[in-house]
Amino acid sequence: MDNKNNPWKKDFPILDQKVNDEDLIYLDNAATTQKPQTVINDITDFYTHDNANVHRGVHTLAERSTEQFEQAREKIQHFINAEHSDEIIYTKGTTDSLNIIARSYGEENIEEGDEIVISYLEHHSNLVPWQQLAIKKHATLKYIELDNDGFVDLDDAKKKITDKTKIVSIAHVSNVLGVINPVKEIAKLAHQHGAVMVVDGAQSVPHMPVDVQNLDCDFLAFSGHKMLGPTGIGVLYGKEELLNQMSPVDFGGEMINFVHLYETDWNDLPWKFEAGTPNVGGAIVLGNAVDYLNEIGMDKIFDYEKKLVDYVLPKLLDIDGLTVYGPHDPKKHTSVISFNLDNLHPHDLATGLDMEGVAVRAGHHCAQPLMKYLGVSATARASFYFYNTFDDADTLVKAIIATKEFFKNGTI
Ligand code: PLP
C-alpha cells in the first residue's frame, strides 16, 4: 500500500509541508495527533456562529452551545460504550482525570496500610498522583513486574493484588513499549479483592475500540488531543455508582445545586465534577473528532495500524545496531515503537531524523521508572496513526540508516 491507497492523509493539511526541505513525516502521534480539516473547520464554525457559555443562559446561543456540549458528551459515551452519559466527565486531559480520581476516590478511600497497585511501565501521570496519595495516607505503592516482552505480567499481578489493595491503575497501552496490557483480566483480579480498577486509556482510546462495560473498569482516563481533538479537553469515565459516592475536588460555579452561607449541595453528575466554565468549544469539537473516527471505524483504524506495524517492525529489527524495545513479534506490538541506535544518544538520532523531515520523539517519555527498568536513560520513539502510510514507514527506516551513516562518518 502507498500514499495513494491511504484515503485519510489528505484530510490533514499540516502533513502537506516540507521540513528541512523534505516532506514532513509526522511520527509523534503518541505525544499528540494532527487534526483533520473538518475538525479545524469545526473550531472556527463554533466561534463564528455558536459561542456562548453553557447551562447558564436562556438566550439562543447559550441553548445552542449547551445542546452541542451535551450532545458531544453522548457521542463520547457511545464511543467507549458507557452505560450513561453522566458517567462522562469533561476534564483537561488524561493527567487531570487521573488526578481527580486520586484526589477524590483516593483521598476518600485510602487509609494507612492500604495498597495501591500500579506497574513499572506507567506514564508519570498514572504514577505520581498515586505515589503522592500513598505518601500522604501512609499507604503502600506496589509495582507489578513486566514480562520479557514488556507486558504487565499477569502472574505477578496475582501476587501483588491482595485483600489490602484498594486501587489498581494500569495503562491500557504503553506509550513506550507499545504493548496492550491485559486490563480486563487485571480488573477481574482487582474486583476479586474488592479494589477498583483504573485504566489509563491515553494510548488505547485513539487507536482501538475500547468498551468500558466489556473491560469492566471502574474508571477510564483519556485525552482529546491524542485522538484528533483540541488540547485542553479530556475525559474521565467513572461508573455512575462510584461517581455518585465521590466528592468533587474543585469548587465554584456549575458544580453546585444550592449554596447556603455555611454549606453547599452538589450538583448532579456529571456537572458535580465540572466546576467553572468548561472548555465548551474543546468538548464540542472533540465530539466532532469522535464522529470523524467513527466514520472510519475504530476496528478499521486498529487493523490498518496493525498492518503498518507488520510492515515496519521487521525492517527496524533488521537495522544493524538498532535496539527495539517491547515485543519483537509484530502481532504483539501496537504502533508505538521505541528504539535506540548503538553509540548515539536518542536526541541526536531524533535530530538526525528531523533533518530528513521525520518527526519522532526522544527522551524518557514521562516514564522515568520504566527507563530505569529497561536500563536506559532515554529512547527514540516513532508512533504512527492511521493517516501514516507505508511510504512513511519506509522513509523512517531510510532516515534511521542515513542518520547512522552520518554519525558514523563523524561529520558532527
Ligand atoms: N498516559 C499515557 C499512557 C500517555 O501516553 C500520556 C501522554 O503522553 C498521558 C497519560 C498524559 O496525557 P496528557 O498529557 O494528555 O494529560
Image (cartoon, grey):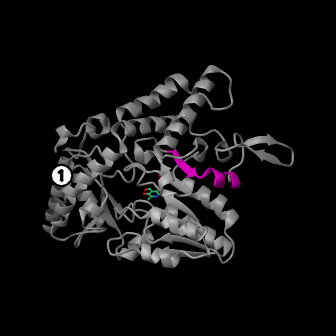
**Magenta part of the chain:** 232-246
Q: Is residue 158 left or right of residue 107?
A: left
Q: Is residue 67 left or right of residue 338?
A: right
Using the image, determine if residue 398 lies above or below residue 276: below
Find disc 1 in the rendering and name its residue.
Answer: 395
Where residue 242 appears, as percent x and y from the top left, is 65, 55
Question: Is residue 144 in sight in this rendering?
Answer: no
Kindly tell me whether mark 1's CB lies below 8 Å from ligand 1. no
Location of the C terminus (image quadrant): bottom left
- Image quadrant in which you'd find residue 400: bottom left
Q: Secondary structure at mark 1?
A: helix
Q: Amino acid at mark 1?
A: Thr
Instruction: Check the image and report above or below for 256 versus 349.
Output: above
Residue 233 within the magenta-colored segment of the rendering: yes
> Residue 326 appears at what percent x and percent y?
31, 68
Look at 15% across and 69% down and name the residue there: 320
Quick one: quadrant of the N terminus?
A: top left
Front-most of 318 and 144? 144
The x and y percentages for residue 79 are: 46, 43
| Point 54% across, 39% down: residue | 73
Taking the spot 28% from the left edge, 43% from the top edge, the residue there is 387
Q: Nearer the viewer, residue 342 or 172?
A: 172
Is disc 1 surrounded by few (<14), some (14 to 19) or many (20+) residues within 10 Å? some
Tell me, yes or no, whether the highlighted magenta stretch contains residue 324.
no
Where in the figure is residue 258, as x and y percent of width and height? 80, 40
- Residue at 68% in and 26% down: 57
Q: Is 29 positioned to the left or the right of 213 in the image?
A: left
User: Which residue is outermost to the top?
Assistant: 60
